[in-house]
Image (cartoon, rainbow, N blue to C red):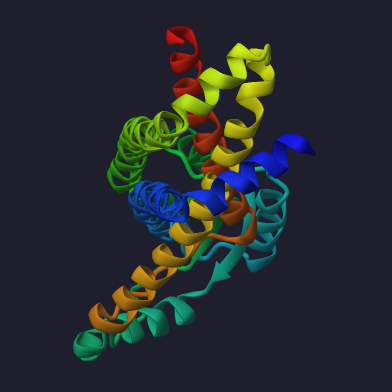
Amino acid sequence: MLSFQTAMTAFRRSPLLSALSVTTIAFSLFAFGLFGLVALNIRNALEHVAERVEVRAFVADSTPIEQVTAASDEIAKYPEVLNVEIVTREQALQRARKELGEFSDVFDGQFLPSSLDVKLKPGFRDPKTVRAVVERVRGFGFIDDVRFGEEWITQLYRLRNIAGVAGVALGLAFAAVAVIIIGATIRMAVLARAREISIMRLVGATDGFIRRPFLIEGSIKGVLGGVLALVLTYLAMRLLDQYLHFQTAFFDRRMAMLGILFGALMGLLGSAVSVGRHLRRV
């Protein structure tokens, strides 16, 4: 309790320096938050594209509908499969006319085969899993051909892996820069109270007793900076939506809380490093 009161007293004694610390932390985390927002929307975009991954198995002519229905029910029980849709020749023709409206006059004959359209569950849309499902579907004797856009799926997951690795690397770099900036800012607050620390040392205060108010102060500044960074990130997203007509997703409540906790952690670490360095020199 005494440490908390000391930290609050430090806030009141140097409001300008405290505001500078909070603002610096906020802008450091704001840059990190913008990167996180971009990474989140890239991931959502890739997941949206991945939802289009499906296996289309073309059925041989004159196959009894009962046999096709039985196969559809069996395939739907695969653990990787979300659902199976039976597409008749008539439905295939209507879909082709709808998707290629300007060429609708080309589709006059019943030349499109019926098919089984197999949609896969999230987490089972990688190339290896899709190929495994395709091989099982090919095992049905009445299936003429199976198409699943193998090259497209491979490229999609390659892009997803590259984005994931790049996101982790850049995220760590942004986090390191944020810690350095926050540490330097809190170092200014420590130096401003260097005389007070020296007096406390002379009267027998332990290092832990001296550190605690600074750690509490750093955590509070980190929380305030995290909240401000979250507000700035939200405003930036709204401006982007308004002027560039982008539909961007924002952090959910859990991610927002993690961002604020990350700010508190950064403030705590910055204070710990700065105070520890100063105490070793006193």
The residue depicted at 46 percent of the width and 76 percent of the height is: 89
Q: Please determine whether, in this image, residue 122 is positioned above or below residue 49.
A: above
Identify whether 170 is placed above or below 106: above
The image position of residue 259, as x and y in percent, is 54, 49
Name the image quarter holding residue 175: top left
Q: Nearer the viewer, residue 45 or 25?
A: 25
| In the rendered image, the vertical position of residue 205 relative to residue 54, given as above or below | above
Answer with left or right where residue 78 lies relative to residue 21. Answer: right
Q: Is residue 13 above or below residue 88?
A: above
Residue located 39% across and 72% down the image = 235
Report the residue at 33% width, 37% height from top: 174
Q: Between residue 115 and residue 41, name the one nearer to us.
A: 41
Residue most extreme to the right = 1
Identify which residue, 163 or 209, lies in the foreground: 209
Where residue 77 sits: x, y (%)? 73, 48
Q: How many marks?
A: 0
Q: Quadrant of the N terminus?
A: top right
Q: Position of residue 217 (x, y in %)?
A: 58, 40
Left or right of 203 in this view: 31: left
| Residue 275, x across and y down, in percent | 50, 22
Name the residue located 57 percent from the left edge and 32 percent from the top edge. 214
Please indicate, yes or no, whether residue 141 appears anywhere in the rendered image. no
Q: Nearer the viewer, residue 240 or 227?
A: 227
Q: Is residue 165 visible?
A: yes
